[in-house]
Image (cartoon, grey):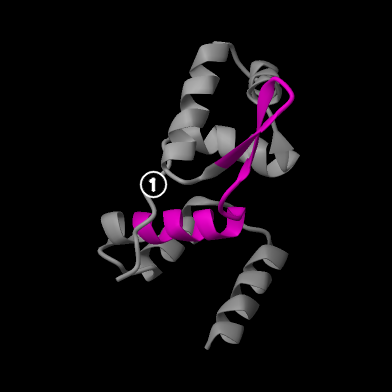
Amino acid sequence: MKTRIRPLTLQELEIMKVVWDLQTTTVRDVYEALLRRRKIAYTTVMTMMNILETKKYLKKRAEDRAYVYRAARPRSQVIKAMVRDFVDRVFNGFAEPLLIQLVKDHRLSKKELEDLARTVEEAE
């Protein structure tokens, strides 16, 4: 049986986006990146990164006097799992209502609609 990936909170996802972008990073690097967007405590970032390591989203190694972190899971794998979890919880596993909602709620350009149609055709 496949181990289910524990979902990310919004704050955890925000940290993971920074880690994915930087590839290898320290708590200080993530803290400074987040601080440019909003006020956050260094200790909060450190705690969240420890939680992400426990959840197996991050791996760390000691280097000099700091830990260096990297993503343990690729961005695409995590996003895929999060979308699947959302569709299961909100739409009982059916993706069509989600797609219809996205098309209705977002003003998609003609090109975006054509790209979506092409993707659907390729999936068939």
Residue found farthest to the bottom: 124
Query: Is residue 114 placed above or below 102 in the rendered structure?
Result: below
Reading the image, the residue beneath label 1 is 7
Amino acid type shown at disc 1: Pro
- Residue 47: tell me if it is visible: yes
Task: Name the residue rendered at 56%, 33% in the picture.
Answer: 14
Where residue 19 appears, x then y in whole percent?
65, 38
Q: Quadrant of residue 115?
A: bottom right
Question: 44 or 115, which lies in front?
Answer: 44
Task: Name the residue rendered at 25%, 64% in the picture.
Answer: 92
Q: Is residue 75 magenta?
A: yes
Question: 62 or 101, which lies in front?
Answer: 62
Q: Secondary structure at mark 1?
A: loop
79 vs 5, left or right, is right
Query: Is residue 58 placed above or below 109 in the rendered structure?
Result: above
Where residue 72 appears, x then y in whole percent?
57, 50
Where residue 71 appears, x then y in whole percent?
61, 46
Task: Name the residue rendered at 61%, 77% in the picture.
Answer: 119
34 vs 82, left or right, is right
Question: 50 or 17, which lies in front?
Answer: 50
Where residue 117 appears, x then y in whole percent?
60, 76
Q: Which residues are magenta?
A: 59-86
